Image: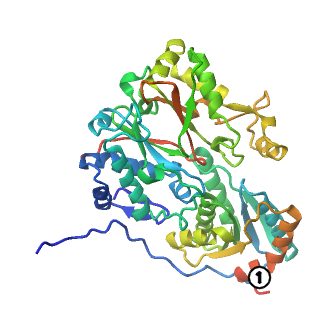
Amino acid sequence: MIAVLPPRNANCTVERLAINAAMTLAPVEAMPLMTTALEAMADPAFALHALNATTGSVVPALIVNGPVARQLDIPAGAGCLGGVAGAAPAIGRALRLVMRNIAGQLIGVTSQSVYGQPGRVAGIVFAEWEEMSPWAPFAERRGVSGNAVTVYGAMGTTNICDLVADTGAGLLEIIGKSLAYPAANGFLTSSAFSETLVAVNPVWAKLIARDIPDVAEVQALLWKHATLPLDWWPEPYHEPFEKAGRILPGGTVPLVPSAEHVFVLVAGGEGNLHAAALHSWGDTRTTTRPVSHAA
Amino acid sequence: MALVTILDPSSLVGSTTDDPGPDVQWLSGRKVGIRVDILWRSWDWVAEEWARLLEADGAQVTTWRAQGRTGEAGDKTLAELSSLVEEVEVMIVGLGNCGSCTSWTIHDAVFAAERGRSTVAVTTRHFERLGRGIAAQKGRRGLRIHVLPYPLDTRPEAEVRQIARQHYPALLKRLGVDV
């Protein structure tokens, strides 16, 4: 058995995963990746039962690190979040079928998602472009070296476009400020915890690292800029923020609790101009696991 | 002739019980826990009204607010829930008024019901079906669910409080209180 998957709380076995994967033509070599991803989704910290039931549009996104990404042709470059030919959509679709056929996630029945999102069809499956990253691999920074998969509850993908910034600090300011909009998941007064993820294209990553080589400092600057003044929200929102202890001394509210909850990785095409933001859902916590099962 | 084998992509689920758990029967002297959360002000108002009425009927009410559900905050929340369930004889758990909060409401209600407490989960009308489905999948198809009107959270406070008072007799009936 791989995991017990809610809401049906059904046993997901390797055999059942394989049946669903066969329907999408996902490569058999991807079985270890899919198995590990399902194990990660079943981690209590990921709160899969709530994620599968929510009115939100969330889907578990897969971020792949290590040689397995190349071996499976998981996209890290141009069009990595959707549209590239390769195995990623089949892998993503197989996991979506597992959620429907095994976990029992059915729109209008066990899932109350008001809109859903395109990622609920064939998943969001991409890799970090490690060779182009000035920083240690994303999974390694989360404690897992080599082949790894990270599952991240993504409310969707949001484009961040800029043609003006020409310094690392300037880019981080515009990206950070672009992450922060009043109704983002992290700003919900009911969000006891949240994360956010930024995929930076390789050209921007190089520019940022030229000026700010330490990725922890990059995260800190993004966190600093991803705040909004309390008075951006109407008065009824102020008390819940105060009760939750969310207001910083300067009268601003941060998108996520601390800089470590701003995830940064390198992915995307070399045409630059764009970054991608993926806001988290609820208080789901991102989970990273080594991909080590035999195929 | 070729033989085609069709494999089942789904999985079987475990058994489920229709047992709603013990009836409350009487309120005087009974310890009642009300679980609220950090999402719905309307549920706070309903809980306040029901707490007042329960206390007027002789019950001792403890209101507990569920907050973070993952990481260390989640461990703390579960420990607090466990302590509350140990203390009380009756649990009123809400509010299922969205997808995830319905899932957590049923999660906490089943937690109490499985420990033998007289338990009722509370949802709004739109999320009743989800609540019943999740309860069944958690093995408690018979879990008591009391249903409030939908939408609830956008109504004025006075109207919500009136709804709470109007629903109180039905809540007691659902809990098996001998009125």
* Residue closer to the observer: A241 or A117: A117
Expressed as whole percent of the image width and height from the top left, the position of residue A102 reads: 40, 63
Classify residue A5 by image quadrant: bottom left
Residue A101, given in percent of the width and then of the height, sits at: 40, 64
Q: Position of residue A125 (x, y in %)?
A: 40, 43
Q: Position of residue A98 (x, y in %)?
A: 39, 59
Amino acid type, callout 1: Trp
Foreground residue, A295 or A179? A179
Say whether residue A85 is visible: yes
Taking A138 as reference, is A171 above or below it? above
- The answer to whether B173 is drawn above or below residue B76 in the figure is below
For residue B92, which quarter of the picture? Answer: bottom right
Residue extending furthest toward the bottom: B178
**Left or right: B56, with A40 as reference point:** right
Q: Looking at the image, can residue B115 be seen?
A: no
Q: Which residue is mark 1?
A: B26
Q: Residue at x 60, y 60 (%)?
A: B99
Q: Is residue A157 left or right of residue A28?
A: right
For label 1, the crowd category at 10 Å Cα-Cα, with few meaning under 14, some 14 to 19 and many 20 or more, is: some
* Chain on which label 1 sits: B
